[in-house]
Image: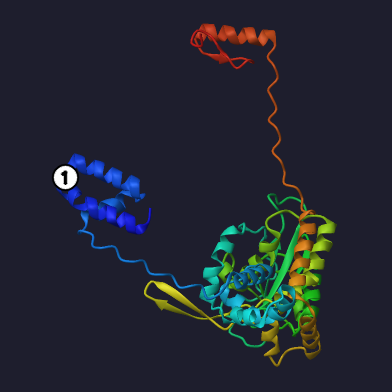
Amino acid sequence: MSHEAKWEYLRAIHRRYREASWALRQRILDEFCQVTGYHRKYGLRLLNGPPPGPARPRRRRRAPTYGPRVIQVLAAIWEAAGCPWAVRLQALLPLWLPWARTRFRLAPALTEQLLALSPRQMDRRLQPHKRRLPHRRYGRTKPGTLLKHHIPLKTDRWDVTTPGFTEIDLVAHAGERGDGEFLHSLNLTDIPTTWVETRAVLGRGQAGVRDALEEMRRALPFRLRGIDSDNGSEFINAHLYRYCQAHEIQFTRGRPYKKDDNAHIEQKNWTHVRKLFGYVRYDSAEALTAMNDLYRQELRLFQNLFLPSVKLVRKVRVGARVRRIYDHPQTPLERVLASPERDPGKVAHLQALRERLDPFALAQAIDQKLERLYALAHPRPRPQPQARPPALSAVERKSLQAVSEIFGIPCVVGSGRSTGSRGK
């Protein structure tokens, strides 16, 4: 039934409804809602409202500016990049388009349309794709007490522009149980540039964490100047303390039970580790090798070279709400390039890699390695079937029946039927 037909029907019955008795009004309302499909409350509002005028013609909707082919390519780039926020998606398009032109055979006009899309328009047009995508605990860190008085608390905001001041944390891959040894991801993020390095370690041994940190220090395209950790014993120990002293690294820690002191690394723990590997258990040497291979190769390059990130500039309170203002999205490599403290040799090598590597091929390689890694996850423990109680002997059965007859208490025997005077 068209909108115009419904409106004409309303005009025909409106006066009759207003002049009818209460019982007749109920029948008219029932019929009106049944014919038009309107909700009963909406039907009441129309019938009790002012007399309807002539039906106004519906406004013709403007034809979409961007065709289905543009949105199809945009959705493919969005999914390959890990479904980023629209502001970040707009910033990464110029980086990805050289390879997208070849992969999707884009015409120049279509390329111009992709670059002309605003973040709000991207959000609206990608909404159906977001609904179809599947939606992808507490930590197990023991507090360290050794050397706490030597390692100062760091609770102020990291207001630095020089790369090298970082936050570190461990992410447990324990699954549903915390017994035995299992893998952890040692995650490190640089505050000024948002550069991220991650390595997997088996257990939370102090020497293993120190060795993984040394490997990440050598991989950074700038000098490591400071680390800020939580109060776990894997960080608050003599091994790491002496290591930081030997390499002139400032070592600070957050307050106990205050995760906001390490907000930067907590956010990276989700986007760079938990979002990819989930909450399943990895506890084998094969999983350790596979996870480190992914961290050292494709994942590191994909996240630092091709995915822009934003940094919070300031917060503005508007009434009861807080409005967050971010800077322009940039990749971590672009932020490193803007700093005079970068390592020229490493940065030149990374720039050459970005010119040569295809981000779509990197994303595909990451997905393939993740699938192989998922197969190495420890299976979830299945609940054991409940054992049946042993059958009663003849003597036990007679004793229960005697108790039931004497005290009048219904007793359940092996068959599940109650015996005794009350059970009959």
Does residue 204 appear in this view?
no
Residue type at tag 1: Ala
Q: Nearer the viewer, residue 79 or 154?
A: 79
Q: Relative to 291, does residue 111 appear above or below in the rendering?
A: below
Q: Residue sitting at 65 percent across and 59 percent down?
A: 139
Residue 370: x %, y % from top left? 76, 61
Q: Residue sitting at 81 percent across and 61 percent down?
A: 288
Q: Nearer the viewer, residue 86 or 138?
A: 86
Q: Nearer the viewer, residue 82 or 244?
A: 82
Q: Quadrant of residue 346?
A: bottom right
Residue 225: x %, y % from top left? 71, 83
Q: Quadrant of residue 259?
A: bottom right
Q: Relative to 6, does residue 403 appear above or below in the rendering?
A: above
Q: Nearer the viewer, residue 304 or 408?
A: 304
Label 1 secondary element = loop
Q: Residue sitting at 54 percent across and 76 percent down?
A: 119
Does residue 63 appear in this view?
yes
User: Would residue 411 appear left or right of 353 to someone viewing this image?
Assistant: left
Residue 128: x %, y % from top left? 55, 62
Which residue is under mark 1? 20
User: Would residue 244 appear left or right of 409 to someone viewing this image?
Assistant: right
Q: Relative to 276, does residue 392 appear above or below in the rendering?
A: above
Check disc 1: other Cα within 10 Å, few if <14, some if 14-19, many if 20+.
few
Residue 274: x %, y % from top left? 67, 62
Q: Quadrant of residue 83?
A: bottom right
User: Would residue 215 appear left or right of 152 to someone viewing this image?
Assistant: right
The image's colour scheme reads rainbow
Q: Relative to 340, does residue 298 appear above or below in the rendering?
A: above
